[in-house]
Image: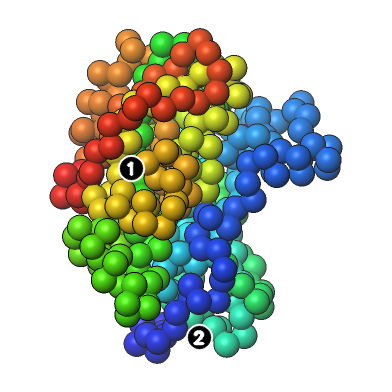
Amino acid sequence: MTDRSDVADVRLTEYADLHGCSCKVGRSDLDDLLREAGLTESRDELLFGVGEDAAARQLTDDLALVSTVDFFTPIIDDPYDFGRVAACNAASDAFATGAVDNLDCLAVLGLPQELTTAAPMILAGIADAIDGMGGVVAGGHTIISPWPFAGGAVSATAPPEELLTSQRATTGDRLYLTKPLGTQSAMGALRVSDDEFVDVVAEAAGRSVRTIGDEAVAWMTTPNRAAAVAARDVASAATDITGFGLVGQAEVLADNADVGIEVTRLPVIEGTEGLSALFGYGLEDGESAETSGGLLLSVPPSHTATLESRLDDAGVFYRQIGRVTDGDGVSLRDPTVEPIARAER
């Protein structure tokens, strides 16, 4: 296997203009694209599909197959960690539907010719992450590409009655988030190389930029599998927080369920709120792009105690961040910004 020292000087992020899930096509543009392509109609063959985090097809009375694909440009320079983040992010779309069993991944990788020495470590990161989620890399596809990217086509199974979508959030539900926000700000700070600006970034962060970055990587490489298992049979709806950011993903939940979303709390990686203000990422407004973020769960009040107990038992971070209303769209009600250090999980 390739040693990390063989690619120690590689800076993957320098080969892309957009990083991580910020390379994702914007929600309004994506809606227009799907409409123009005629892909907005539901299909009888599927339990759910376009417009959800993943697609689901019922195979038998007690088995459904969930499939999804996700890949993105580097958000971090270390090839192995890039692979781990990419794998967790891809699997998260399946986990958001409650499908956690029989996990398979077909790895997807594209690299410029001059970065091919990084390929073994990226693939090793993907394989190790999938293995840690109880899954297996079953194959994949690799190409030469001017911008590097990595991810995978993921499949998993679940009983049909245990599947979650974004369509069933109900007025009165409480909203839970299972990872803090701020990955875009943390990774943006790590990419700063201008000596004069480094001091400005450090002052805005208020703590070690390296520590903030390490914590962000730790969150991004934490699978959402345990959170998905905890949410089974108690959540009414779910999605995961990725490139659209918290508000963008909450808008999907609101639109698909014809409800309103009210956000009252924003847990963020400590230090990223100052970095976001410096970079203009909009973290304090829930607008920053997130990569491999947590699950956003809509839970009836009668089930919140059960969910919290399960998450506590599994060692999963969570915060109740708002509620579902009978309005429409997403509103931030002077949300409390709560800094989270990794030790507080």
Amino acid type, label 2: Thr
Measuring 57% from the left and 47% from the top, which residue is drawn there? 155
**Can you say which quadrant of the picture contains the N terminus?**
bottom left
Residue at 37% from the left image edge and 57% from the top image edge? 278
Residue that numbered label 2 is attached to: 117
| Label placed on residue 276 | none
Q: Could you tell whether 4 is left or right of 253 in the image?
A: left
Res 298 → quadrant: top left
Specify the amino acid type for callout 1: Lys
**Mark 2–mark 1 distance (CA, rounded to whole Å):** 33 Å
Q: Which mark is residue 179?
A: 1
Residue depicted at x 35% and y 65%: 189
Q: Residue 232: give x, y in percent of width and height.
A: 40, 26
Is residue 232 visible in the rendered image? The answer is no
Residue at (46, 13) in percent of width and height: 325
Place of residue 105 in the rendered image (x, y in percent of width and height, measured from the top left): 54, 56
Instruction: Return the disc, 2 or 1, that comes first in the chain's sequence.
Output: 2
Q: Is residue 236 above or below residue 105?
A: above
Q: Secondary structure at mark 1?
A: loop
Q: Is residue 170 above or below residue 185?
A: above
Residue 109 appears anywhere in the view: yes
